[in-house]
Amino acid sequence: MKLIVNNSDYIGVTSSVFCMLHCFATPFLFLSSPLSLSIYQELTLLWYLLNYIFLFLSFVAIYHSVKNSTNIFVKVFLYLGWVSLASLIIIETFEIISIPEIYTYFSGFSLAILHVYNLKYCRCEDDECCTT
C-alpha cells in the first residue's frame, strides 16, 4: 500500500498514457482484424473492460495524489478530470450520445499532465503536510 501512496503520480501518469494508447488503438484493432463472431465478441468485452480497469487505477492514483498534494487547484482538477473521463467512457460504452473521441483523449492527457505537475511542484515533503 505504501508503494501506491508514494508513487501515486507515477501510477496516474502511466495509467493515463496507457488509457490514451488503448483509445488510439481501438479503431485500428477492430477495423483491421477479420475475426469470427464469437472471438470478436469476447475480444470486444475484454477490450472494453480495459476502460474500466484504467478508470479504477486512475481513481486510486488520484485519491492518493490528492492526499499528498499541497495545491488545492490540482486536487480539484484531478477529480474533475477523472469525472470527465469517466463520464465520457460511460457515454461511449452505452452510446448515449455521440461525442468526438478528442474529448476523451484530452481528458486522459489532462490527467497525465496534472499528475506530472503535482509530482514536480505540489508533493508533500513529509507526512505532516498530508494531514492538513
Image (tube, rainbow, N blue to C red):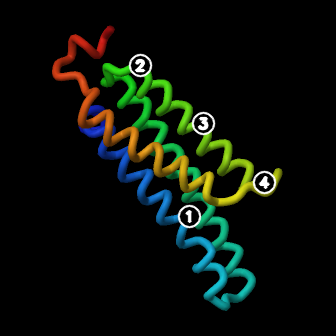
Q: Which residue is mark 2?
A: 72
Residue at x 25%, y 31% (from the top left corner): 121
On the image, which quarter does residue 65 sit in?
A: top left
The kind of residue tagged 1 is: Cys
Task: Find out whether the residues at labels 2 and 4 contact each other: C-beta distance under 8 Å.
Answer: no
Residue at x 41%, y 28% (from the top left corner): 74
Residue at x 25%, y 13% (from the top left corner): 129
Crowding at mark 1 (Cα within 10 Å: few <14, some 14-19, many 20+): some
Task: Find out whether the residues at labels 3 and 1 contact each other: C-beta distance under 8 Å.
Answer: no
Image position, residue 93 (x, y; %): 72, 56
Residue at x 32%, y 8% (from the top left corner): 132
Cα–Cα span, label 2 and label 4: 33 Å
76 or 131, nearer to the observer? 76
The kind of residue tagged 4 is: Phe
74 or 3, nearer to the observer? 74
Q: Which residue is mark 4?
A: 94
Cα–Cα span, label 3 and label 4: 16 Å
